[in-house]
Image (cartoon, rainbow, N blue to C red):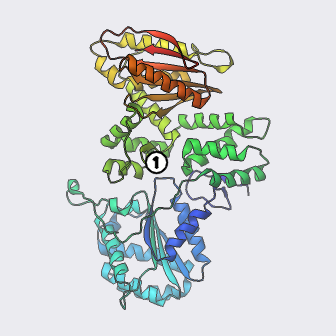
Amino acid sequence: MRKKFNITGLCIPEHHYMMDVSQKEREVMAMVDTGAYFVINRPRQYGKTTMLKLLQDTLETSTDYMGFKLSFEDVENSFHQSEEAFSEMFADRLEAEIKYVAPQLIAHWQESRKGIRNFATLSRAISELVIAAEKKLVLLIDEVDASSNYQVFLKFLAMLRNKYLERYRRGHDTFHSIVLAGVHDIKSLKYKLRNPEEAQYNSPWNIATDFNVRMSFIPKEIEPMLQEYCEAEDVSMDIPWMAERLYYYTSGYPFLVSKLCKTIAENILPTKTEKRWEEADLESSLHLLLKENNTNFDSLIKNLENNADLYALVYRLILDGDVIPFNQHNPTINLGVIYGVFKSNGQLKIHNRIYEQLIYNYMASKTLTHLKTDYTYGGHFLLENNALDMEAVLLKFQQFMKEQHSNKHQDFLEEQGRLIFLAFLAPILNGQGHAFREVQTSLEKRLDIVVTYFQHTYIIELKRWYGPKAHEGGLTQLADYLDIHGEDKGFLLIFDGRKDRGWEQEHISHQGKDIFAVWV
């Protein structure tokens, strides 16, 4: 059976091309060995279920452990209405696992569970099972978010917590280790009360060990997947370069890495005469990904729209160029981390360039609906060799802003000018290019846009007008930035809030660089 790149559900090594998870699996197993209770809490499509399955497989071959893997994904609402109903559901699912993992214990469990009426009696039945087992028992529960809104589930966790605290007392034997998996850390779960507005945070799992295993994939962990694929499919590529570039766009988000690879393998490569992955193929895959609807992107946008504070923080980060220290104790930042929107390197960052571009496009589309425009761009700005006439693009944007400039629009234009430019740029790029942002830390809040269009790169600095002295410093910074990218020409778009603005444009030579500046 030929393997495939998988983007849905469980990844199975025998069926799917997979990144190297060996180090992650060793770290998780080391936590189990120490008897830790913990939560694999990561965003959706981040490999949680796959990690549980790999852990289960390791436990099955162990001489020391038995692993029971349950899922709460399809638990009906009726099972959350009482301790008795939830205990019965748990006993049923555990029994199904015991039949396969430890059939020698099934008669014992069936006898013990007859007395289960509530969590106290469930606790006793668990202790009897642990005592009867010849190995240490490990409980794995997937999709705990499905039950997290219910008070009875948190009482269930509290029962397991109490057993953990009393595990050295006679008759209180319990699972050696418990591993939960879900988007949320248990500390942030809410439960429903009679009045939903009274929902509050609870900590029924304060015994849990922090889960610090890095679940994203770095280039050296991506390379083995590409190597296996090349050997199996007789495909060639520069594997180290491709792994680095995949990481550059995705920051190692498992779904995004696999999705880009799957599109190249199944949609792009069959159209080529040579079985080789090239840079252009990865760019095409990226273009196709950003055009499509998928559950991962839908979830990202939904989480932004459902949380006004999160939306506003993302806007500040992307468009205003604000430098925000990372502090996960901040509830809005923590929420963004839970949903996979943010990452940290000391400062708050959007998790990956694909998400950043997707959010750009979404916010830009929303913004452009506030303004009336009859422009149809087509190929108006296209030069030979698939190059863009970026000077013409900036001059057309200047004309657009001048036409829109009125008392009605002035405040809106000045507040959201940068986003309006990105919205203006989107139909010109028309899915053939991208505008990635690079924030420069300074009092001017510069926002450098790196536009890629086919094989061409354009550096555009967006900044506000703070006077001639700041302007001169900005030119030097842009020239230095052009050096970093190996470019001789750059573009400067200045948002000028003065009432007597002149709507100028100017070619400037600075430090050997050709800079075209436009004021709007």
Q: Nearer the viewer, residue 109 or 373?
A: 373
Q: Nearer the viewer, residue 29 or 498?
A: 498
Q: Nearer the viewer, residue 516 or 484?
A: 484
What amino acid type should be assigned to the residue bearing mark 1? Asn
Residue at the limit of the structure toward the bottom, as seen here: 170
Coordinates of residue 268 in the picture (x, y in percent): 69, 37
* Res 307 quadrant in image: top left
Asked whether, in this view, residue 86 is left or right of residue 34, the answer is: left
Quadrant in the picture for the C terminus: top left
Answer whether residue 377 is visible to the viewer in this image.
no
Coordinates of residue 114 in the picture (x, y in percent): 38, 85
Q: Which residue lies at the image location 52% right of the left edge and 68% below the top edge?
A: 28
Label 1 element class? loop
Q: Which residue lies at the image location 61% right of the left edge and 44% below the top edge?
A: 246
Q: Which residue is mark 1?
A: 345
User: Is the residue 234 above or below the residue 26 in the image?
Assistant: above
Q: Which residue lies at the image location 41% right of the left edge and 25% below the top edge?
A: 418
Quadrant in the picture for the N terminus: bottom right
Asked whether, in this view, residue 59 is left or right of residue 351, the answer is: right
Coordinates of residue 496 in the picture (x, y in percent): 36, 17
Asked whether, in this view, residue 9 is left or right of residue 193, the answer is: right
Answer whether residue 322 is visible to the viewer in this image.
yes
Coordinates of residue 497 in the picture (x, y in percent): 32, 17
